[in-house]
Image (tube, rainbow, N blue to C red):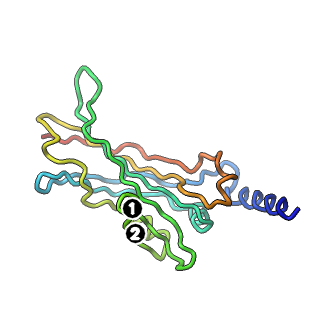
């Protein structure tokens, strides 16, 4: 009986947590504002500025133990006239944002390296996530002569869930969004 009451209470809380009907959990701006490449000793380094959404639903989800994943996709393609474009590089920079209740801090972790940074506010954490500096995506020997197109796209999705929420939220898909591609030409 107690277990059933707990499940009903949890279901009611999740309904309230989901916000008003029709509200998107990731409402707000998700956009690559700028991106460029500079070359250092034959290595092409990507710099980008991204604006991520910030709203009460994201704040509440993090406080409830949900981890959010932030992806930055970078592609380098060689356009071909009579065939599909040739993809030279297709990389993804993955970072996770979580809330640490004991320290009352937001923690950003790079998935590949495990490097972590912590922030006092959600706005500071999102600002940090929106800055990508000197990410090596390509080396000069990978390119031949001609022109190439570089495209960058940001994404945000729900990552790990606490065990208590996994069974109840497996069907929702409103925690996944990607921006439009930000593209430019790179003549070589």
Residue named by callout 1: 110
Residue 6 spot, x, y in % from top left: 80, 63
Residue 81 spot, x, y in % from top left: 22, 23
94 and 182: which one is in front? 94
Q: Residue at the spot x=68%, y=52% of the render? A: 167
Which residue is the extreme one toward the right? 1
Horizontal arrangement in the rendering, residue 122 relative to residue 3 (left or right):
left
Residue named by callout 2: 116
* Residue 183 shows in the view: no
36 and 137: which one is in front? 137
Picture mark count: 2
133 and 9: which one is in front? 9
Q: Quadrant of the C terminus?
A: top left
* Residue 156 shows in the view: yes
Residue 134 spot, x, y in % from top left: 24, 59
Q: Label 1: how many residues lie within 10 Å, few (<14), some (14-19) or many (20+)?
A: some
Q: Residue at the spot x=49%, y=69% of the render? A: 122
Horizontal arrangement in the rendering, residue 5 relative to residue 58 (left or right):
right
Q: CA distance from mark 2 to mark 1?
A: 7 Å
Which residue is the extreme one toward the top? 82
Q: Secondary structure at mark 2?
A: strand
Disc 2 vs disc 1: Cβ atoms closer than 8 Å?
yes
Mark sitting earlier along the chain (2/1): 1
Q: Quadrant of the N terminus?
A: bottom right
Q: Residue at the spot x=40%, y=71% of the render? A: 117
């Amino acid at each position: 009986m107690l277990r059933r009451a707990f499940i009903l209470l949890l279901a009611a809380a999740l309904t309230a947590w989901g916000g008003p009907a029709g509200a998107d959990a990731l409402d707000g701006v998700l956009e690559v504002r700028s991106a460029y490449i500079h070359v250092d000793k034959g290595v092409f380094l990507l710099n980008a500025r991204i604006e991520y959404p910030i709203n009460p639903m994201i704040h509440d989800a993090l406080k409830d133990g949900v981890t959010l994943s932030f992806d930055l996709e970078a592609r380098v393609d060689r356009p071909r006239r009579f065939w599909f474009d040739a993809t030279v590089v297709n990389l993804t920079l993955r970072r996770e944002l979580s809330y640490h209740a004991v320290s009352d801090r937001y923690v950003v972790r790079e998935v590949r390296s495990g490097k972590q940074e912590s922030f006092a506010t959600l706005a500071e954490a999102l600002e940090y996530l929106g800055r990508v500096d000197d990410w090596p995506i390509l080396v000069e020997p990978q390119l031949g002569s001609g022109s190439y197109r570089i495209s960058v796209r940001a994404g945000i999705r729900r990552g790990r869930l606490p065990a208590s929420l996994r069974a109840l939220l497996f069907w929702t898909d409103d925690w996944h969004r990607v921006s439009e591609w930000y593209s430019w030409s790179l003549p070589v």
